[in-house]
Image: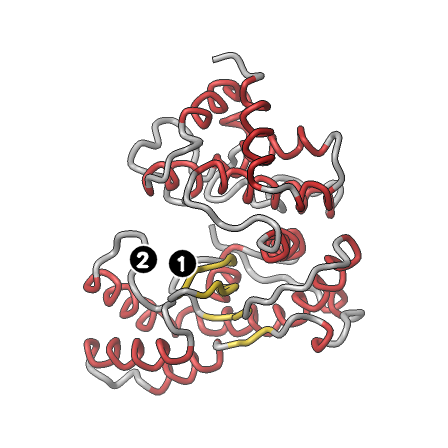
Amino acid sequence: MTRSILLAAALFAAAPAAAQAPALQSQVEAFDDFATASTAMPPAERVKAFRAKFDALLPGFYEPRFGATEAQYDARVQKALEGYPATRDKLLAAARDFTGAYATANARFRSVFPDYAPTMPIYLIHSLGEMDGGTRELRGRTVAIFGADMIARIHDGGTIGPFLDHELFHFHHARYFPDCPALWCSLWQEGLAVYVAARMNPGADDRALLLTFPRPIRPEVEPKLAQAMCLVRTKLGSTDQQDYATFFFGRGGKAQGGWPPRFGYYLGYVLARQLGDTMTLDALARLPPEQVKAKLEAALAAYRC
């Protein structure tokens, strides 16, 4: 789903100085310099040089994840470099616009969560198609990543604000809710982030909340909501990567069945919304893991299986 970046200049006219926001370290220019200067290199040599250079800039990111082999990852790097000329202008425009959007989002987010003070480094990079935003554990440290390539591909002026609210909430939430491998943790983290974005953007539709990528989730899940909740209830304790893929990956998992990709975001959102009827956003953000797990189990128990 490709959309043009349509970030209106007026959106950023009142943006606070970038210094007021947590430092955003851009490596987009470094990628652009390398990609444009290395076109004459043999492919294998070019990939090797890329990985050496960018492993030094962002250690641990540009290496295989999610079961990929070294050969598969090298092929991914080669594909991104060879395809870069066709996407260069759009990506660089998205990266330029993102600086203002990020500053605006930080000011807005602090108006809701005044104690927002992330300590992790925050990068804007070419993610080789991996992500528009999120956190990664890289060699023992947590870093926040924004992928300019995917932002250019799937975001525009209608989605960038809620998207940033979603991601900044993840950075904030990490202060109170550490990552854990069980599926229920991701159900809460992602669902609550969608709910926070919805509350911060009254009237936001499913597209703005990223519940239509890669295809609309609500129309397929809502008629079978109890069945979907019963399914996720059986997987709460799972640490299997394929179970995670089924609920949260854009490409889905091997056992996707008839469920749309990323439908775990919608299920988590529905559960967070139920809890939000009686709790403030700040209280939800501060819930410790043991209370979250108990509340999710209680909410899921209300669905007849």
Q: Which quadrant holds residue 106?
A: bottom right
Query: In the visual, does 104 lie left or right of 69?
Result: right
Q: Earlier in the sequence, mark 2 or mark 1?
A: 2
Which residue has dot 2 on it?
A: 65
Q: Is residue 3 above or below residue 122?
A: above
Three-letter residue code for mark 2: Arg
Which residue lies at the image location 42% right of the left edge and 85% below the top edge?
33
Mark 2–mark 1 Cα distance, whole angstroms, equals: 10 Å
Coordinates of residue 303 in the picture (x, y in percent): 55, 16
Query: In the visual, does 7 lie left or right of 74?
Result: right
Which residue has dot 1 on it?
A: 130
Which residue lies at the image location 50% right of the left edge and 41% below the top edge?
185
Which residue lies at the image location 54% right of the left edge and 33% below the top edge?
293
> Between tags 2 and 1, which lies in front?
2
Point out which mark residue 166 bears.
none
Query: In the visual, does 174 lie left or right of 109?
Result: left
Q: Is residue 112 above or below residue 217?
A: below
Q: Secondary structure at mark 2?
A: loop
Q: Secondary structure at mark 1?
A: loop
Coordinates of residue 129 in the picture (x, y in percent): 40, 60
Q: Which quadrant holds residue 267?
A: top right
- Label 2 packing within 10 angstroms: few (<14), some (14-19), many (20+): few
- Label 1 packing within 10 angstroms: few (<14), some (14-19), many (20+): few
